[in-house]
Image (spheres, rainbow, N blue to C red):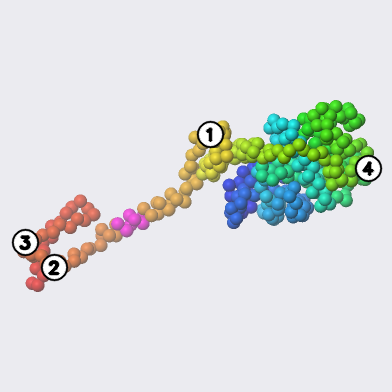
């Protein structure tokens, strides 16, 4: 584990990629769980912090941005959930998939309404929150007025990289691809781009007009933003709550990540640090296989308690020294009253096995 900023404990790696590394950690001062993201350069840190500071519901909340040991960090809200990719693999019904599609459109509407674009919209960059809804992560931060610089193959618009590329309309192409994947289980093919939409018509015919408008090859034929596109958003039959399924999957995912981190710590001889992670992992998922395998291997290493051992030795040494001095110092026997000096004797037990009989003296003699 790389050194993390001070004031954060019980950290576990939860993500990594070209954007940087993400750790789940507890903030000592507040006790809340946060996502600590290490970014490559200061300019990206400032750009990301600027966007997160907008306080949009579709983005994780910003807690702070700072530098530590030459690295640049962002502390943001920890979202307990799974990626859209993982949610799509849960075996949801068509109605539940349609709800996910609705939530994604609503998240992008809020982002575009704030004058921002995503720049790399794909299922891996969307979190399904077990409590609230969709959260967009790992934005490219290219700005609504600048040319779009990148994206992921299979999700980026045909005009990506052109000087005249409109990043908002490029986002809409990516949105159309992701919506098709949610509703049909696969990205659009050539027969879909031509306007036939055979799979979408069979799976979710109400979504054909919206998706067809989003993936027009000519960007000028697409809506101006997700705000305009949402006018063609079909109505759902009922409000279906998928949060229970998402929460269970999120618990299992986090439990696996915590167990993996604990296993790495145990292999490095850091059992004391691994124990809290294993305990939390089993609290989230009592059947977590890796945690149950790692738990018997945990040994609280002596070196982690070296200071305690040294303190115990020091206490024993001082105690022995004190006992030696006590034995070497002459003891005065206090005067006793009310006893018959001629007949009574007492026995005083010392630290040594020997017992000495001392005659009593008459008090007034």
Which quadrant holds the N terminus? top right
Q: Is disc 2 surrounded by few (<14), some (14 to 19) or many (20+) residues within 10 Å?
A: few
Look at 26% across and 60% down and name the residue there: 328
Q: Could you say which disc has been placed on residue 337 in the image?
A: 2
Give the residue number, with chain letter if any, for mark 1: 292
Q: Is residue 320 magenta?
A: yes
Disc on the earlier residue, 4 or 3 = 4
Q: Is residue 318 magenta?
A: yes
327, above or below 17, in the image:
below
Q: Nearer the viewer, mark 4 or mark 3?
A: 4
Disc on the earlier residue, 1 or 3 = 1
Q: CA distance from mark 3 to mark 2?
A: 14 Å
Q: Is disc 1 surrounded by few (<14), some (14 to 19) or many (20+) residues within 10 Å?
A: some
Look at 89% across and 38% down and name the residue there: 213
Q: CA distance from mark 1 to mark 4?
A: 56 Å
Identify the secondary structure beneath mark 4.
Answer: helix
Find out whether the residues at labels 1 and 4 contact each other: C-beta distance under 8 Å. no
Q: Is disc 3 surrounded by few (<14), some (14 to 19) or many (20+) residues within 10 Å?
A: few
Left/right of residue 39 with respect to residue 194 in the rendered view: left
Give the residue number, with chain letter if any, for mark 3: 343
Q: How many marks?
A: 4
The magenta span reads: 317-323
Q: Nearest the camera: 52 or 153?
A: 52
Q: CA distance from mark 2 to mark 1?
A: 71 Å
Identify the secondary structure beneath mark 3.
Answer: loop
Q: Nearest the camera: 132 or 55?
A: 132
Which quadrant holds the C terminus? bottom left
Instruction: Judge whether residue 23 can be spotted in this image.
Output: no
Q: CA distance from mark 1 to mark 3?
A: 74 Å
């Amino acid at each position: 584990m790389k050194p993390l900023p001070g004031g954060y404990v019980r950290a576990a790696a939860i993500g990594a990629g070209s954007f940087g590394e993400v750790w789940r950690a507890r903030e000592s001062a507040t006790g809340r769980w946060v996502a600590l993201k290490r970014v490559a350069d200061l300019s990206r840190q400032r750009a990301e912090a600027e966007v997160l500071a907008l306080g949009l519901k579709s983005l994780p909340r910003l807690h702070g941005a700072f530098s530590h040991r030459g690295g640049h960090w962002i502390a943001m809200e920890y979202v307990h959930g799974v990626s859209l990719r993982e949610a799509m693999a849960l075996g949801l019904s068509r109605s539940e998939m349609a709800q996910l599609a609705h939530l994604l459109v609503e998240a992008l509407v809020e982002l575009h309404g704030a004058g921002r674009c995503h720049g790399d919209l794909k299922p891996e960059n969307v979190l399904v929150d077990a409590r609230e809804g969709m959260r967009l992560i790992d934005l490219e931060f290219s700005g609504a007025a600048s040319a779009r610089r990148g994206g992921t193959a299979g999700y980026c618009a045909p005009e990506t990289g052109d000087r005249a590329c409109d990043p908002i309309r490029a986002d809409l192409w990516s949105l159309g691809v992701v919506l098709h994947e949610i509703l049909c289980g696969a990205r659009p093919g050539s027969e879909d781009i031509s306007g036939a939409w055979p799979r979408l018509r069979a799976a979710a015919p109400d979504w054909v007009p919206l998706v067809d408008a989003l993936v027009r090859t000519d960007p000028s034929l697409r809506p101006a933003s997700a705000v305009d596109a949402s006018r063609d958003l079909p109505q759902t039959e009922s409000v279906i709550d998928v949060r229970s399924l998402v929460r269970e999957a999120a618990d299992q995912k986090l439990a696996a990540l915590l167990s993996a981190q604990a296993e790495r710590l145990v292999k490095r001889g850091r059992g004391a640090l691994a124990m809290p992670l294993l305990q939390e992992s089993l609290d989230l998922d009592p059947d977590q296989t890796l945690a149950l395998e790692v738990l018997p291997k945990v040994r609280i290493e002596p070196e982690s308690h070296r200071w305690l051992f040294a303190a115990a030795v020091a206490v024993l040494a001082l105690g022995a020294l004190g006992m030696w001095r006590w034995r070497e110092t002459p003891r005065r026997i206090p005067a006793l009253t009310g006893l018959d000096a001629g007949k009574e004797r007492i026995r005083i037990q010392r630290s040594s096995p020997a017992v000495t009989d001392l005659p009593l003296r008459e008090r007034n003699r």
